[in-house]
Structures are given as structure tokens and as C-alpha cells.
Amino acid sequence: MNWGVEDFAAAAALLAAAWVGIALVRRNVHGRVLRPILLVGVVLVVLMIWAHLAVGIV
């Protein structure tokens, strides 16, 4: 695989967005049921975007 600078920039942006999303959920959501649901949602969205960028799944 021939990775370029733009690939690493996209990966860094995706990880940063995941970090911000998780931090926002942890800081602003206080429900015992809603918080884990939203955290799993953030992780699933990140994984879907990663899979789409990697091989075009979805």
C-alpha cells in the first residue's frame, strides 16, 4: 500500500473527531442509559467512516 500525506491527515482528522465526539458526550451527557448509547454511536460512526475510506464499504 502506498500511503501519502493526505491519508495520514485523514486518519489524524478522523481520530481527532472521534476524540472530540467522545469528550463532548462524556462532558455533556449525564444519563446512565443515554451516555453509553451515544458513546457506542460515536465509535460506530468512526468505524463506518474508516471502513468507507479504507475499502469503500457502506
Image: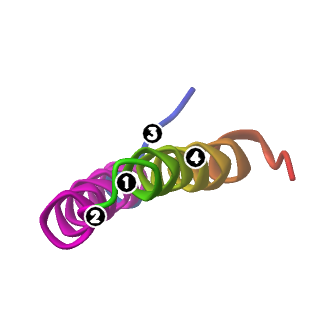
Q: Residue at x 30, y 50 (%)?
A: 15
**Considering only order in the chain, which callout, 4 or 2, is on the residue closer to the N terminus?**
2
**Considering only order in the chain, which callout, 2 or 3, is on the residue closer to the N terminus?**
3
Please, what secondary structure does the residue beneath circle 1 have? Answer: helix
**Considering only order in the chain, which callout, 1 or 2, is on the residue closer to the N terminus?**
2
Q: Residue at x 81, y 49 (%)?
A: 56
Mark 3 → mark 1, Cα distance in angstroms: 36 Å
Label 3 is placed on what type of residue?
Trp
Viewer-side residue, 44 vs 31: 31
Q: Residue at x 76, y 40 (%)?
A: 55
Q: Main secondary structure of the magenta part?
A: helix
Q: Identify the magenta region.
A: 7-30
Which label sits in the foreground, 1 or 4?
Answer: 1
The answer to whether 37 appears left or right of 30 in the picture is right
Rendered location of residue 47, percent (x, y): 58, 42
Find residue 50 and name its label. 4
Viewer-side residue, 35 vs 44: 35
Residue with the mark numbered 1: 35
The quarter of the displayed image where residue 30 is located: bottom left
Residue with the mark numbered 2: 25
For the residues labelled 2 and 4, say whether their Cβ atoms are less than 8 Å apart. Answer: no
**Considering only order in the chain, which callout, 4 or 3, is on the residue closer to the N terminus?**
3
Mark 1 → mark 4, Cα distance in angstroms: 23 Å
Please, what secondary structure does the residue beneath circle 4 have? Answer: helix
Which label sits in the foreground, 2 or 4?
Answer: 2
Viewer-side residue, 22 vs 18: 22
Mark 2 → mark 4, Cα distance in angstroms: 20 Å
Label 4 crowding class (10 Å Cα cut-off): few <14, some 14-19, many 20+?
some
The answer to whether 51 appears left or right of 24 in the picture is right
Residue with the mark numbered 3: 3
Q: How many marks?
A: 4
**Considering only order in the chain, which callout, 1 or 3, is on the residue closer to the N terminus?**
3
